[in-house]
Image: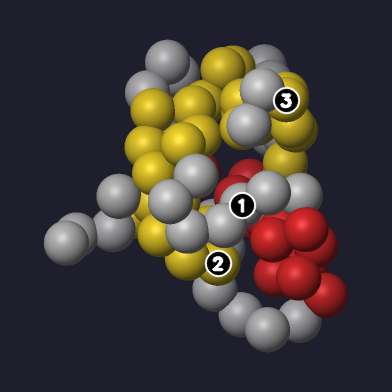
Amino acid sequence: MSTRALDQLAVGETATVDSVEGDGAVAIRLQEMGFTAGTKVALVKTAPLGDPLEFTLRGFHISLRRAEAARVRVA
């Protein structure tokens, strides 16, 4: 299965989390926030300058910096 980074989604597009890259504090925090394999996530909107990005995930709205979103792989 082909994957891409979460920050590559288009507004309104939905994908499924495949994995979180890295093993540092940011990766752990992303997993604690619900970015775990099999979870559906959608890009709601992008800030005017392109950063941060707002996603829906598990019924919540979450804003991430583009660099953080790039660590999440989706299918």
- Residue 22: give its label: none
Q: How crowded is mark 1: few (under 14 residues within 10 Å), some or many (20 or more)?
A: many
Mark 1 or mark 3: whose residue is earlier in sequence: 1
Which amino acid does the dot numbered 1 rest on? Phe
Name the foreground residue: 42 vs 4: 42
Quadrant in which residue 56 is drawn: top right
Q: Residue at x 50, y 34 (%)?
A: 41
Compared across the picture, whether 34 is left or right of 44 comes to: right
Q: Residues within 10 Å of mark 3 (few under 14, many from 20)?
A: few
Mark 3 or mark 2: whose residue is earlier in sequence: 2
Mark 2 or mark 1: whose residue is earlier in sequence: 2
Q: Name the residue under label 2.
A: 20
Which amino acid does the dot numbered 2 rest on? Val
Secondary structure category for the residue under label 1: loop
Residue 17 visible in rendering: yes
Secondary structure category for the residue under label 2: strand
Q: Distance between the residues labelled 1 and 3?
A: 12 Å
Question: Where is residue 69 shown, x and y percent of the image?
Answer: 60, 50
Task: Single out the residue that lies furthest toward the bottom.
Answer: 23
Is 58 located above or below residue 31 in the figure? above
Compared across the picture, whether 5 is left or right of 31 comes to: left
Compared across the picture, whether 59 is left or right of 43 comes to: right
Q: How crowded is mark 2: few (under 14 residues within 10 Å), some or many (20 or more)?
A: many
Residue 46 visible in rendering: no
Q: Name the residue under label 3.
A: 60
Q: Mark 1 points at which residue?
A: 35
Is 44 located above or below residue 36 in the figure? above
Q: Are marks 2 and 1 in contact (CB under 8 Å)?
A: yes
Q: Which residue is drawn at 39% across and 44% down?
A: 16
Q: Which residue is drawn at 16% across and 62% down?
A: 1
Q: Nearer the viewer, mark 3 or mark 2?
A: 3
